[in-house]
Image (spheres, coloured by chain):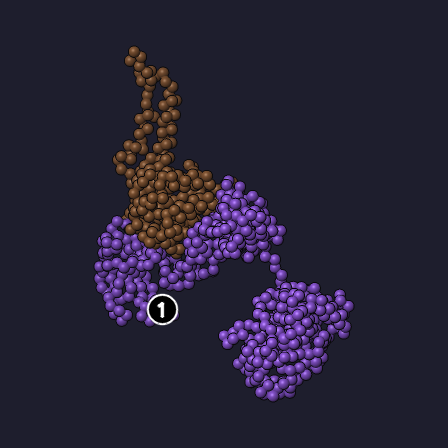
Chain colours: A brown, B purple
Amino acid sequence: MSQPDFASLPLTAFEDVAALSARRSARWRPGLAASRGLALHNEVFASSREGAGTGAALALALDDWSNMSRGDGCEAQDRRSVLWVQTREAARRTGRPYRAGLPELLQGRVIHVLAEKCEDALFALEEGLRCRDLAFVVGEIAGNPKALDFTASRRLTLAGEKHGVPLFLVRIDAARDLSSARMRWEIASAPSAAPHWNAQAPGLPRWQAELFRARAHAPGTWLLAEEQGDLTASKARGAGDEILGNWTAGLRQRRPLRRA
Amino acid sequence: MSPPQKGSFRTRRILSIWLPALAMDRWQMVTGKQAGALAARPLVLIADTAHGPRIEAVNRAGAAAGAHKGMMLADARTLCPEIATAPSDPAGDLGFLETLAIWAQRWGPWSALDPPDGLLVDVTAVAHLFGGENRLLADVQQAFAQRQLAVRTAIAPTAGAAWALAHHGRDGAIVEGADAIERALSDLPVAALRLDQDVVTVLRRLGLKRLGEIATLGRDAIQRRFRNRKSPAANPLVRLDQLLGRVPEPLLPVVPQQVPLVQRRLLEPIRHRQLLDTVVTDLAGDMARELEGQGQGARRLELGLWRVDGEVVVRRLELAAATRDPAHIVRLFAARLDDVDAGFGIEMLRLRASWAEPLALAQNDIETAAETHGTSLAACIDRLTVRLGAQAVTRPVPFASHIPERAQRWQPPLEPEASSQGQLAFHARPLKLLDSPESIAVLYATPDGYPQRFRWRGQVHEVARVEGPERIAPEWWRERGGARLRDYYRIEDEAGRRYWIYRLGIIGDGRGGPPDWYLHGLCA
């Protein structure tokens, strides 16, 4: 009876697996778009009782935008617009974008689309993803409408990946249904840091962000904040995440078995 | 020709052409053969008014019988019972006059309409091409005679003088120089000043019948009499100055414009959508070639579908930016043709670009480029607008107002943004504003303490941090006196959710009872 001879296997096989796993399980961090490319279809789940979902979606989008390297020799000012699609129900629950409160970079760029039905909103999102003159597309859809099924989300993913336009779809008061989104976040507000001058006042926004489903990253929880226009993520991970993040450690340190 | 004299206006030469019987001449031209039989008998053209038919134009026999313009038909019938009538067509007459104005540019570089029945042509420095101004006028007379249009003409340094001479002076008058104008015009009636009828009546009651008599009265007296009449048609002094060239009189030249138009007459009426799409594709291709030839792009397109049973269906399309891409046009029309009822079939289609803008030639085959590189923003907005409606696709722009919901307006996305004052950096504004502020119940220390707890949409929030108030007073120049001020607070609750709330009014402001609280915006 012959046992598999582990020692005879080349060590590189293990190393490859380890490297692959390490790459696969690389944790998400802000500014990853510069090295790893954009995640083109993102979903952000949030409650309608707060503006956190939209705020965090914009922060993530701006982080990707500022870290995305543009083509060589492209020195012209980036004048691309941003398409912001809302269903009427979403606008009723969480309001419409207010120009004076938007991030400064976006103030003159927003094109707003108010769709009566979810089907119209999906059409507008897809048309936006096909447009080369848009920096990114923001969508807000309330609840779990029937039209937004797996097929529809797959359509959006394919359109976005074909033309390279990122989509940030804010799902308001929605259950985590089937979706082909590359990254799926659950966002809630977190108490803000006290401002320097007036400790009683609300400070710069912070969000509790849970990445519960991602294709290229391990899930995890972060505390997102914006400092001087840059997105920062501090570690808010629990013990489980620690194990998850380092489960390849054992593989890497594995030694060849001794012959009995 | 006399040598040029001093003064700038003397260099201008304006030809005025008056068609005294335009409506009747045109009616005879349109009716053709049978007009000859009717022309010998009294004939009037009538228009319907609230008080019955009124005479708009009269032929020679009709005038001899006693009918004249402005008379009621019933009165004319009592004078001449056998009078024949035909409907008048003022819109058609004006259209005919426009084509005449373009045709009249054979005598000068530009021409202007002089409604309802005249033309003005600038013949400055072109008379030598016709062998002098007399020959030019003879040419004009002959050309109009060939078209069987009665005409009276005059040439003068100003449009007003030419008009006066054509209408009230000797036919074919030519006037040069300031003295000659005064001499030629002094015998004309005051109606030659192109004044409103009531002003002519006033002048007649003052005993002023000829233009020369106005000068004898003295300018000050007339100025005093008509001091509050600003419109040229109501002020004889302004008209007199225009006549003599002391005051410039702007004229609007007629510029011929070809509206790009393509159409298809079909051998067999079509009743199916597939065939219709094919024809629309052909039309779009034709239209693209037509527009390309003119170096233009369409902003508005009208597709007319003529049905066999006499119905016309029109579908109109507005584009965000000038385009002549046939595939794009077809795609936009496809969404608009879903509800067309073909009935017994469509026999003719016509595509018209009623609004076109200059568009430079560019690389063609944009649709293939769109597959690989994505669509342009204008094409994207067109597609969204066609499906969702123009009011659904908008861009927020700032507006000068203190009230937050008024300080933002929505405009079409590609229109240029009006310049506005920059916003103040210390005004923190929420990311999103609710369509209408939602009423909340707030626990706070009266009269103007910080909010401590509030209930919104059935849930209680404990306020952890507050900043405020930012007081925004009502805009007194716009709102009624009873409007209350707003005290805005930026707050954060115990879970970190950030809101923008306000208290409407303050206790003791005398504008209502205890103040209400509203939640107006959600912060990021």
Q: Quadrant of the N terminus of chain A?
A: top left
Identity of the residue drawn at 57% across and 67% down? B91
Q: Is mark 1 on a helix, strand or loop?
A: loop
Q: Is residue B473 left or right of residue B514?
A: right
Residue, far top: A1
Q: Residue at x 39, y 56 (%)?
A: A100
Kind of residue at disc 1: Glu
Up/down of A49 relative to A18, above or below:
below
Return the residue found at the far front.
B82
How far from the left and from the top, in percent, is residue B23?
62, 70
Is residue A56 visible from the viewing direction of this image? no
- The residue nearer to you, when weighing B19 against B327, is B19
Q: In this view, does A131 lie above or below B244?
A: above
Pinpoint residue B110: horizontal percent, then vertical percent. Answer: 66, 65
B455 horizontally vs B167: left or right: left
**Residue at x 42% of width, y 36% of height:** A36
| Residue B174 visible, this angle | yes
Residue A169 position by quadrant = top left
Q: Nearer the viewer, residue A233 or B338?
A: B338
Who's the residue at 27% across and 37% down the image?
A238
Give the number of marks.
1
Considering the image in quadrants, where does the C terminus of chain A appear? top left
Query: Residue A215: horizontal and vertical position, in percent?
Result: 37, 35
- A2 in relation to B524, above or below: above
Residue matched to label 1: B479
Image coordinates for residue B5, horizontal then vertical, percent: 73, 75
Disc 1: CA contacts within 10 A as few (<14), some (14-19) or many (>=20)? few
| Picture quadrant where residue B168 is located | bottom right
Picture layout, residue B58 above or below residue A196 = below
